[in-house]
Image: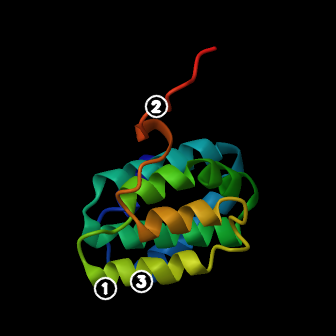
Amino acid sequence: KSSLSEDLLPTSQEKKYVIANLTTIAKENKEFHLEVVSAIIVRLTDTTDDNKLDIWCLIDNICKRVGGRYRNAFAERLLMLVAYEMPRADSKMRERFGKLIETWRKVFPDCMQEVYARFSEPQLKHGIDAPRSKRVRV
């Protein structure tokens, strides 16, 4: 886990090589998928907007090339991650992120409508941060 966190430092060079190696590590350690997913999410939440796309590319690569447990674990967290951890500041990064999520139709088919809604309206509130609905009491 600590090696994974170190490899995901924002100063990493040769990003494609690092992503490929980390994907291989994930594939070889499927029994520890929750720990790997957790380490990636921690890095995603701790990094700057400039580096978020690199972490999203790692998530994308693991889900497409390894799939299975990883895809399921990221799918469960995808909506919250997109809502709070997509690149926002730089319009070029946002555009590249938009192109990346376009490739997810087959990877995350059950939640893509919601992902697009969150991406197109980043301030849209859903889930735990949404206002509670008023229930009519009879």
Q: Type of residue at label 2?
A: Arg
Q: Which of marks 2 and 3 is in front?
A: 2
Q: Identify the amino acid type marked 3.
A: Arg
Q: Viewer-proximal residue, 108 or 34?
A: 108
Q: Which of 136 and 117 is in front in this view?
A: 136
- The residue at 50%/41% (across/down) is 127
| Residue 45 relative to residue 38: left or right | left
Q: Which residue is denoted by mark 3 in the rendering?
A: 96
- Give the label, 2 or 1, closer to the camera: 2
C-alpha distance separating marks 3 and 1: 6 Å
**Residue position marked by numbered label 2 in the rendering:** 132
Query: Residue at the spot x=45%, y=51% of the render?
Result: 41
Q: Where is residue 18 in the image (x, y as percent from the top left)?
A: 45, 73
Q: Mark 1 points at which residue?
A: 92
Residue 54 in the image: above or below residue 32: below
Q: Position of residue 86 (x, y in %)?
A: 39, 64
Give the spatial CA distance, label 2 vs label 1.
35 Å
Task: Identify the residue at horizontal 63%, vertical 66% (top origin).
Answer: 112
Query: Label 1 neighbourhood size at 10 Å, few (<14), some (14-19), many (20+)?
Result: few
Is 23 left or right of 98, judged from the image as shown? right
Tag 1 secondary structure? helix
